[in-house]
Amino acid sequence: MIKLTKLNGEEFVLNANLIQFVESRPDTFITLTTEDRVIVRETPDEVVRRCLEYSRAIRTIPGLSGQGDL
């Protein structure tokens, strides 16, 4: 999950695994795998950075990488 900001200043959390496209038009449009679209204040580069941080974090937390004692 990544924290982002809508154009009206409202913060929300988005499941990064649902992101299909990130575009600059000049606002940042995020298209989800559900075909929904979200417009955010963050730049496309910032969205990608947060997604990468999230992806790295879930791989380094014991029990969340899929290799724990299940």
Image (spheres, rainbow, N blue to C red):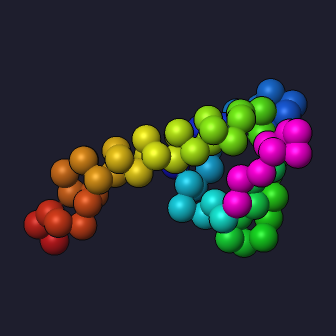
Give the residue drawn at x 72%, y 72%.
34
Relative side of 15 to 37, left or right: left
Q: Is residue 2 left or right of residue 69?
A: right
Residue 5 point in image, percent of width and height = 72, 34
Residue 63: x and y in percent read: 21, 57
User: In this image, 65 relative to 44: left or right?
Assistant: left
Res. 3 image quadrant: top right
Residue 16 place in picture, x, y as percent:
56, 54
Q: Residue at x 66, y 65 (%)?
A: 20
Magenta span: predominant SS is strand
Q: Nearer the viewer, residue 29 or 4?
A: 29
Q: Visible in this render: residue 12?
A: no
The span shown in magenta is 21-28
Q: Is residue 18 above or below residue 62?
A: below
Image coordinates of residue 64 in percent, x first then y, are 28, 57
Determine the residue positioned at 63% across, 60% down: 19
Magenta stretch: includes residue 29: no
11 sits left or right of 9 in the view? left
Residue 36 seen anywhere in this rendered image of the structure? yes
Outermost residue on the left side: it is: 69
- The residue drawn where x is 63% and y is 38% is 45
Residue closer to the observer: 46 or 35: 46
- Identify the image quadrant of the C terminus: bottom left
Callout count: 0
Res 9 quadrant in image: top right
Compared to 34, does 3 lie above or below?
above
Quadrant of the image occupied by residue 43: top right
